[in-house]
Amino acid sequence: MEIPLDQILIQTINGIVTGLILALVASGLTLIFGIMEVVNFAHGELLMLGAYVGVVTLSLTGDFWLALISATVLIAIFGALMYLVTLRPLIGRDPLTTILATFGLSLVLQNYALWQFGAVSRKIPEPIVGHFNLFHLDYPWYRVAVALLSAAIIGGFWLFLKRGTWGIWIRATTQDRVMAQAMGIPVPWVLAGVFAIGSGMAAASGVLFAPFGGVDSTMGLNWILRAFIVVVVGGMGSLAGSVLAAILISLLEAYASLWVSPAQAVIVSFVVLILTLLVRPTGLFVATPK
Amino acid sequence: MSARAAMAEGGAPAQARTEPLLAVAGIHTYYGKSHILHGVSLEVGRGEVVGLLGRNGVGKSTTLKAIAGLVHPSAGEVVFEGRSIGRLASHRVARLGIGYVPEDRRIFPLLSVLENLRTGLDRHGVDKAKRSRLLDKVYSYFPILAERRNQRGGTLSGGEQQMLAIARAMTLEPKIVLLDEPTEGLMPRMVSQIAEIVGALRDEGVAVLLVEQNVPLTLAASRRVYFIEKGEVRHHAMAAELQVNDPVIHQYLGV
């Protein structure tokens, strides 16, 4: 079957756009895993709650960007509190306890959202409504804006990690928590801060994605599953690995949907996951640590 | 004060010259159910180099960890500048001026040399001028680190990593440095460099609590030495009174 070049290009752009949103979700997850070896099963619910905070703020103020910022900030604070109350007491115990705790949290948060906001999906309208002509297709500017914004948030965060004092604290704590603390780094604050940042990033992606798919209590599940695949394929704890893996997997899914239905295209990411686990279980984009 | 005078005063070998900087009093620690320290007591004076000798696994490293706040003693006290620090989190202990250089160096392998040093420099109360002054000082002690400032810590040689670990502790402007087997696995040239650094710290008024297997180096660098056996201090002497082949050394180290 002949695939026209313009379709391939459109799918490339689609893949990169989805990949960048997915990267935003996955970077929070991989960051939290990297620094405290906690697999946060409630990460998707933070995304969902962020989207709801966005819905509420938008209905109160009518300002999408304000909704984005307030969701990010509020859920960051919520994430830090969640860490302090449920995870901090479990640090250093069997990893299974943190898995159960975060899984339990995700159920509580999902049902809270269902109880509070109901089962009907809420809508957030696109804040940027224009389209541009991509070959024969009207392509929404908002999709491009989301990709750029996601890239900007990830890039900003990368600079933050690379340059600032907090960045050095976070990286040092990720590499050796005990020694970081012995050097005077306030590790308990760093851990809470990382949880806040990861949660805020999830909330931002929830609001940014809401105009495409709507907001409901289970929207986190779909994202978290894909984000987990991305984190494993990219290498647990590696930020750059997660970003690359998110784009790779989204591109492959986008290309696959040229031949099969998008629902079947999801299979591609599982195939990549299985192949990664077979061939390079530490992740595709991780240099073998010494 | 001479050793003899001290003996006359207290009947035991000289304690720290004046009010001790650090006093460890009867600390007990456990790892899970195994009882590691059975009441270790020792003192270090301001600017004093004190050696801690003993066989492997007798609790020397654990003593240092307990002082650094990495292990909390279940009984006994750690007093630093008159303040009890046994229950403090290790980052607070570090900020009081206790630099810890662990046995396996534990530099941050993926951070550059400069970033490793910044873990101690980027703290409250260190402005730009002070920061560059501290960096210059550390680089003057370890010129090789200045050359490699942008290299990742993990790519340094063993000796260079040891220097980085000591330099990193020095960025905290410590009043005492806890050195755990700094010469282990190093070439002889590096060993004498480590000995020089210990001397330089002492000359600056920084106290050192030195855990070492290298007996000649410990006796040469220290003013006093403690001997640990089975999680207890069993003997205590002025370093100048001991010979490398002293029966005491045989008894506690089996060398």
Image (spheres, rainbow, N blue to C red):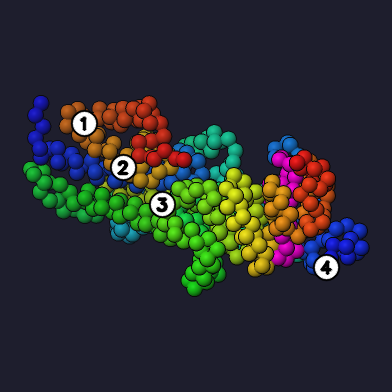
Q: Residue at x 66, y 67 (%)?
A: B203
Distance between mark 3 and mark 1 Cα atoms: 32 Å
Residue at image mark 2: A244
Determine the image quadrant of residue A14.
top left
Q: Nearer the viewer, residue A63 or A95?
A: A95
Is B182 situated left or right of B83 in this image? left
Residue at image mark 1: A256
* Nearer to us: label 2 or label 1: 2
Element on which disc 2 rests: helix
What amino acid is labelled 1 in the image?
Ala
Distance between mark 3 and mark 2 Cα atoms: 21 Å
Q: Residues within 10 Å of mark 4 (few under 14, many from 20)?
A: few
Distance between mark 4 and mark 3 Cα atoms: 61 Å
- Residue A280 locus on image (x, y percent): 38, 31
Q: Residue at x 28, y 38 (%)?
A: A248
What amino acid is labelled 2 in the image?
Leu
- Residue A84 locus on image (x, y percent): 55, 49
Q: Which mark is residue A200?
A: 3
Q: Residues within 10 Å of mark 3 (few under 14, many from 20)?
A: many
Is B98 situated left or right of B148 in this image? right
Element on which disc 1 rests: helix
